[in-house]
Image (cartoon, grey):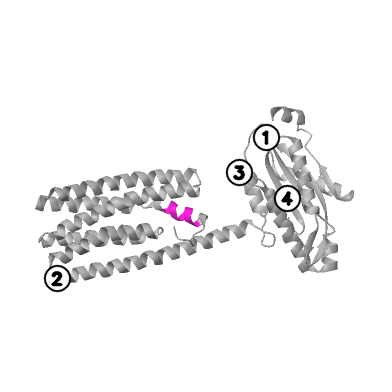
Amino acid sequence: MPSRETDEVFKILVSQLAYTKMPTSVMGLTITAIGLFAYDHLGSIELLLSVVTGCAASVAKIGLMMAHHRFNVTKRASVEQAVRWEILHALLTFVVAGSVGWLASLIFLHRDLSLQILATGLLFGYCAGVSSRISVRPYLAATAIAIAAIPAIICTALAGGSAHWLLTALFAMFLVAAMQSIWHAYHISTRQICLRLEMEYQARHDPLTGLHNRIALIEGFETRGRDEDTLICIHCFDLDGFKTVNDRFGHLVGDELLAAIGKRLRELQGPSNIAVRMGGDEFVMLQPAVRSPAEAEAFAAEILNALRMPYILSGKPITVGISLGYTLERSATADLDAMMRLADAASYRVKRQGGGIDREVPQTLNFSAVSSAA
């Protein structure tokens, strides 16, 4: 795997291997047709074996792509899973490439010109298909082309004669050009994927703090678990005295403070929580899968204590207060807008009292029933 690939880019590139069923089907039929035609003329058992091998590998590869496609639709692959998929694709691709190289080599060792024309078309067609369709995994594509072309190049040279020497040179030049095409196509694909991922990241993140934005909050809320036995918690909070920091130290220091708060919140959010900057000095923390009200209260205190710690900005120690309001609701029936209103109300109430933590919960929520279920 090239070192320039991030894990996310690698997983996307490997997933594309599932979408080459049509070229693989055409190549399998081509191998079968040319191989059987050559076998009918030459009667070589080796030709028949190469046809059977190529046809079986093509069918297996189509089955693999169908399974991979179903996996892509239903799951998001980990790096380890993507590596396993790539290995399976590589093994079958190399077998098909070997059958193409084997078949073409056997044909070029005979003097039948009509069969050699077919073998030339088979080899060029296979290499062109690999260059265009599997270039997303360049080492796999380059190896497959080498397996198919190099034996045929050698056998063409052994056939002797000026025409075969010229064909050998053409094969060799095509092999070099195909390798360059593979890497060119790979670099273009990688750049496009990186650009798409960057745009997706920017669409869901705040550029100053690196936290999620409102879009990501809505998506995270909608994709939450809906277990009847768990709660979901929304923490809404803002900074006490942020305007004073801006007025006293300037807006650049104010931006530094927001970025530093973002860093602390990212450290707190963990794998399931979502930290969000709503705008200005207003933040939200989504805490799904809460097992008890005490768990939400403890996390609210953790947020408060972390953000109240002093910040060293431009060589100056700066502290700010936090007004945090939170609310709880059953995961199965929670509504984001309603929860935001309740959490905001608690946040405004505690701000009027000088900061700290307050809670506002719907009257329909029975804490005793939740605690016993958890």
Toward the viewer: 233 or 322? 322
Circle 4 residue: 284
From this viewpoint, which residue is outermost toward the right? 353
Q: Residue 290's quadrant in the figure?
A: top right
Q: Mark 1 and mark 4: span between their CA atoms? A: 20 Å
Task: Report if residue 137 is visible in the image.
Answer: yes
- Is 274 contained in the magenta span? no
In the displayed structure, 274 sits above or below 251; it is: above
* Quadrant where the image shows the C terminus: top right
Q: Mark 4 and mark 3: span between their CA atoms? A: 17 Å
User: Callout 1, which amino acid?
Assistant: Thr
Magenta-tinted stretch: 9-16
Left or right? Give the position of 334 relative to 63: right
Of label 3 and label 1, which has the lower sequence position? 3
Circle 2 residue: 163
Taking the spot 40% from the left edge, 67% from the top edge, the residue there is 184
Q: Mark 3 and mark 1: span between their CA atoms? A: 15 Å
Q: Residue 343's quadrant in the figure?
A: top right
Q: Position of residue 332 (x, y in %)?
A: 65, 35
Of label 2 and label 3, which has the lower sequence position? 2
* Quadrant where the image shows the N terminus: bottom left
Of tags 2 and 3, the one toward the viewer is 2
Circle 3 residue: 223
Mark 1, secondary structure of its residue: loop
